[in-house]
Image (cartoon, rainbow, N blue to C red):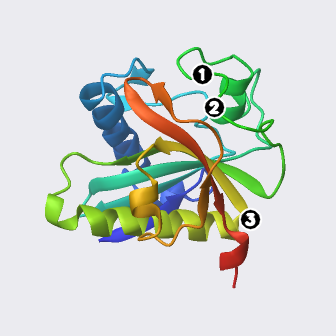
Amino acid sequence: MQTTTLSFANMHNHGELFANLLRARRQSFIVQNKWDLPEAMGMEFDQYDTPASRWIAVHEFGEIRAGIRLTPTTAHCGIYTYMIRDAQRGLLPSIPANLLNEEAPVAENVWESSRVFVSHSTPMKIRRMVHAQLIMEMMKSARDLGAVRVLCIIPANWPRWATRCGLDAVAAGPVLNIDGEESQCVSINLAGNLH
């Protein structure tokens, strides 16, 4: 099993990996979760899939096992910045504006993690390992990009698995029902893990 961090600068070195990641996102979010999201050519995408972002893929023999998108909180494309901030600003009606206890930061050393998934086709016997690899690569990539903190919206059961994955995480907002799932904004501290 491999873990790869993709960017617009390096995706040409990885063949179909980026397209396969977007196909796996479509399967996870549109087909399985039945979310109303943009899609084209069998791939899910949105306004945050820009050259500012990075994408992490856990993959094996061409099959995507899991993925995450990282976006800097300094990103700006048209009226959009990053998902949590745009929800707080009322630009994303499917996400409540009160998702974060503070004003959404705009800082070079704070990144957002979004579109987190483990593929439904990933066998149960390796799901925990795949999830751990995904989180470890997310933390490594975010640190390499200069982040000391990562914000994300994740399932509200995060305290049960955060410690197992080595996350120094705290709730950053209330538990909310988003698209039929109990979710919560979480702040992940990376400063203590810097080497």
Seen in the picture, residue 147 relative to 69 is either above or below; the reply is below
**Residues at marks 2 and 1, CA–CA distance in whole angstroms:** 6 Å
Which residue lies at the image location 36% right of the left edge and 62% below the top edge? 131
Going by the numbered disc 2, the residue's amino acid type is Leu
Going by the numbered disc 3, the residue's amino acid type is Val
Q: Are marks 3 and 1 in contact (CB under 8 Å)?
A: no
Q: Which residue is mark 1?
A: 96
Which residue lies at the image location 70% right of the left edge and 16% below the top edge? 90
Q: Are marks 2 and 1 in contact (CB under 8 Å)?
A: yes
Q: Which residue is mark 3?
A: 148
In primary-sequence order, the first of circles 3 and 1 is: 1
**Which quarter shows the C terminus?**
bottom right
Where residue 36 appears, x then y in whole percent?
40, 17
Q: Which residue is mark 2?
A: 99
Which residue lies at the image location 35% right of the left edge and 70% below the top edge? 2
Secondary structure of residue under mark 3: loop
Asked if one can make out residue 89 in the rendered structure from this viewpoint, the answer is yes
Where residue 69 appears, x then y in whole percent?
53, 47
Secondary structure of residue under mark 1: loop
In primary-sequence order, the first of circles 2 and 3 is: 2
Number of the label disc, if any, that sits on residue 82: none
